[in-house]
Image: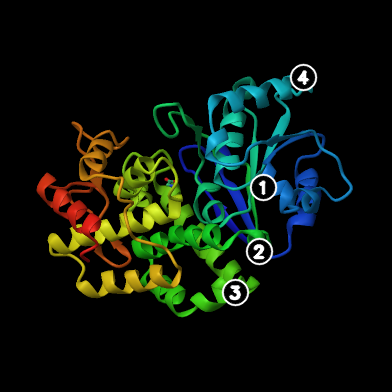
Amino acid sequence: MRKIQVKIPSCPKSSYCIAVGAGSLPKILAQIRKSLPGKELFLITDANVVKAKHLKNLLGKEKLPLFIITPAGEKSKNIKTVIKIIEEMEKKALGRDCVVIALGGGTVGDIAGFVAAIYKRGVPVIQIPTTTVSQADSSVGGKTGVDSSVSKNAFGSFKNPAAVFIDVSTLKTLDKEQFNTGLVESIKHALIADEEYLKYLQKNLKVILARKAKPLEYIAVKNCRIKASVVEADPYEKNKRRVLNYGHTIGHAVESASNYKILHGQAVAIGIIAANIIEQKLGFGGKERLAGLKKLFGKLDISLKIPKTITKRQILDIISRDKKAVKKWPRFVLLEKTGKVLCKKGQFAHKTERKIVEETINILIKQKF
Ligand code: GLY
């Protein structure tokens, strides 16, 4: 098992360990019990995880008080689910000495993390991510929350996990679309931080898609190292952490305008292409990188088409309400070159002229890239 330590300097108690291994799931509970003797555990998972038998694999013959989120997915990521879970925890008479375990993808991790952040003013949470997106991104860094009827993650909190356990074997049960689109967060990490890693992903795509343990462990470790180094430097997204939003400004807008019919990873792939077009317009990044990314997304069978129902006006409207917007205009994370985020006057996210953004959206809609 490979171990990575995440140290949050402003909050020494928030230092935590990420353990990566293939086939580790059946051993994790014993490890948790050993490191937290006497703690009551409460497990939060969802219907998909149960169906994939990850819950059975984690628990073996043991029993834990638990809550199964149904239906699985974004539909349940709301405050009503949080209330139901918290009331269930109260009925079980769990005190501040309990520990929440999140077993599942990004939605489970976000909901369980948020529950842990607010239950009786906060209890620890352990993340056991089981999808490509959550293993690469959302289980590390402490962003938690649920959606309101108006926007994504409107209720939210930073809640660093007490530990993260990644068993890459759990990825075997994902369907192709979920597995492949989840790899976009790995491509994002490579683009913002490590050109060699991008080359590795391009060269080894076949074995990654075959879901072989070794390459999956390799990319899990790479992702966690990159993400850990960013969140250690800026845990609460004051500046540098924004680099993790590469491709997310237009990506989120497309995802939201599609009413979440487009998966997050596909939307971010479109957003990454958008960022590349903007970079070219500003004189950074040549045609080669964009062509390479188009090819890579093509091999992953990720469509870069924006659905016909989505208009330029809609995208502009959503980006103007972006969380990171200043005076109703978003800040874009851009690359100076692969592995190097553009940092002007110490800022990692930039105001980009409206004209350039509008032209970029036109290019995306017309698929002229
Ligand atoms: N997923 C972006 C972040 O954790 O900051």
Asked which secondary structure carries label 4, the reply is helix
Numbered disc in front, either 4 or 2: 2
Residue 307: x and y, percent? 33, 51
Query: Which type of secondary structure does the marked residue at label 2 adopt?
Result: helix
Residue labelled with disc 1: 48
Q: Residue at x 85, y 51 (%)?
A: 60
Q: Distance between the residues labelled 2 and 1?
A: 13 Å
Identify the residue shown where x is 44% and y is 43%: 260
Secondary structure beneath dot 1 equals helix
CA distance separating discs 1 and 3: 21 Å
Tell whether 294 sits left or right of 104.
left
- Number of numbered callouts drawn: 4
Label 3 and label 4: CA atoms lie apart by 44 Å
- Mark 4 or mark 2, earlier in chain: 4
Q: Which mark is residue 316?
A: none
- Badge 3 marks a residue whose secondary structure is loop
Q: Which amino acid does label 1 sit on?
A: Asn
Query: Would the CB of label 3 be found within 8 Å of ligand 1?
Result: no
Quadrant, the C terminus: bottom left
Q: Which residue is drawn at 10% across and 48% down?
A: 355
Residue holding disc 2:
172
The crowd level at tag 4 (other Cα within 10 Å; few <14, some 14-19, many 20+) is few
Q: Of marks 1 and 3, which one's residue comes earlier in the chain?
A: 1
Q: Can residue 341 be seen in this view?
A: no
- The yes-or-no answer for disc 2 within 8 Å of ligand 1 is no
Which comes before the other along the chain, label 1 or label 4? 1
In whole angstroms, how far apart are the C-alphas of marks 1 and 4?
25 Å
The residue to which callout 4 is attached is 91
